[in-house]
Image (spheres, grey):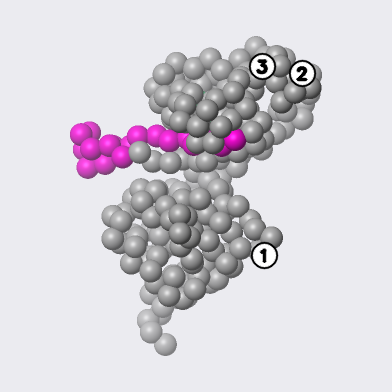
C-alpha cells in the first residue's frame, strides 16, 4: 500500500488467523478492506443454551466494510471478525466516519446501499427458514449463498465459497438431510463439488427452475 496516504494514516495489516474483534465486545471502530478476506461469524444456540454452533454470516473482500454497527448503534459487536487471508484494512472511528461522510456523500450512499443489501440478505434467510421442506431450504440456501457471497466466473458459472457443513448450519438442517439434496443436485449436474469442498453452480437459473419444478410437483402431484 505504498503511496496510499489514507492507508498510511488509518491502515492496519492483519495476518490470516487474526481475530479483529469478538461477538459481544465493545467496539469503537469499523474496518474497510483494502486487500485480503475477512470472515464474519456468530455463535448461535441450538437445542438449548448449552449447544452452540458457529454460523458464518459473510465472507468479505476488498471494498467491503464491517464493524459499522457497533459505532452506528452504540451497541456491542453483533458478530466476530476473523481474517482468513492476509489483509490490509482501514480502521475508522465514529468521528472519522462522520467527517468522511460530510466530505464525500458518495461514502454515505455506499454505506446505505451495503446496509440495504444486508437487509435483503437477512430477509432472504428469514424467507428460506419459513420453508419446512429440506429440499426447498437447501436449494434456497445455496441460491442465497450464490447471490450474496458467490464469485461469478468468466464462463457464467458461480463459485460458492461455502461448505456442506456451513450450508447445513445456515439453513438449520442436519448435515445428512442437506447431503441428500446436494447429491441429487450433483446427479442432475446442477451443482458441482470442488476438491476443496466448495461448490460451483454452472447455471444458477437451473437451480431456481429445479426448485420451481419441485414446488409444482408438491402442489399438483406427479404428472
Ligand atoms: P458490528 O456489530 O460492529 O460487529 C460485527 C459486524 O459484522 C457488524 O458490525 C457488521 O459489520 C457485520 N455483520 C453483522 N451481521 C452481518 C451479516 N448478516 N452479513 C454481513 N455482515 C454482518
- Whole-angstrom CA distance, mark 2 to mark 1, is 37 Å
Marks 1 and 3, the one that precedes in the sequence: 3
Residue 207 marker: none
Q: Quadrant of residue 49?
A: top left
Q: Quadrant of residue 80?
A: top left
Estimate the x, y position of residue 98 in percent, counting from the top left: 68, 16
Q: Would residue 65 be seen by someone viewing this image from the given angle? A: no
Estimate the x, y position of residue 20 in percent, counting from the top left: 49, 24
Q: Nearer the viewer, residue 90 or 69?
A: 90
Residue 155 marker: 1
Residue range (magenta)? 36-53
Q: Is residue 14 left or right of residue 76?
A: right
Please tell me how crowded label 3 is: few (under 14), some (14-19), or many (20+) other residues with Cα within 10 Å. some
Q: Are marks 2 and 3 in contact (CB under 8 Å)?
A: no
Please tell me how crowded label 2 is: few (under 14), some (14-19), or many (20+) other residues with Cα within 10 Å. few
- Whole-angstrom CA distance, mark 1 to mark 3, is 38 Å
- Whole-angstrom CA distance, mark 2 to mark 3, is 9 Å
Label 2 sits on a secondary structure element that is: helix
Q: Is residue 37 left or right of residue 9?
A: left
Query: Which residue, given by chain and number where applicable, does mark 2 sit on?
Result: 5
**Quick one: which residue is furthest to the bottom in this view?**
223
Estimate the x, y position of residue 135 in percent, counting from the top left: 38, 65
Marks 2 and 1, the one that precedes in the sequence: 2
Q: Is residue 77 left or right of residue 113?
A: left
Q: Is residue 51 above or below residue 12?
A: below
Residue 10 marker: 3
Amino acid at each position: 500500500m505504498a503511496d496510499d496516504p489514507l492507508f498510511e494514516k488509518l491502515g492496519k495489516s492483519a495476518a490470516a488467523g487474526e481475530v479483529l474483534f469478538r461477538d459481544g465486545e465493545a467496539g469503537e471502530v469499523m474496518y474497510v478492506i483494502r486487500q485480503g478476506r475477512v470472515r464474519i461469524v456468530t455463535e448461535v444456540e441450538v437445542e438449548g443454551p448449552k449447544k452452540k454452533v458457529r454460523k458464518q454470516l459473510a465472507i468479505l473482500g476488498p471494498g467491503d466494510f464491517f464493524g459499522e454497527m457497533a459505532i452506528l448503534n452504540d451497541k456491542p459487536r453483533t458478530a466476530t471478525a476473523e481474517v482468513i487471508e492476509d489483509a490490509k484494512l482501514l480502521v475508522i472511528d465514529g468521528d472519522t466516519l462522520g467527517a468522511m461522510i460530510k466530505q464525500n456523500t458518495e461514502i454515505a450512499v455506499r454505506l446505505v446501499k451495503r446496509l440495504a443489501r444486508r437487509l435483503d440478505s437477512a430477509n432472504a434467510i428469514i424467507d428460506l427458514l419459513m420453508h419446512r421442506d429440506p429440499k426447498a431450504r437447501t436449494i434456497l440456501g445455496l441460491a442465497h449463498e450464490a447471490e450474496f457471497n458467490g464469485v461469478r466466473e468468466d464462463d457464467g458459472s458461480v463459485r460458492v465459497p461455502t461448505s456442506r457443513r456451513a450450508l447445513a448450519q445456515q439453513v438449520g438442517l442436519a448435515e445428512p438431510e442437506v447431503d441428500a439434496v446436494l447429491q441429487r443436485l450433483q446427479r442432475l449436474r446442477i451443482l458441482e463439488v470442488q476438491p476443496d469442498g466448495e461448490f460451483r453452480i454452472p447455471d444458477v437459473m437451473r437451480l431456481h427452475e429445479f426448485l420451481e419444478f419441485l414446488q409444482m410437483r408438491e402442489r399438483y402431484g406427479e404428472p
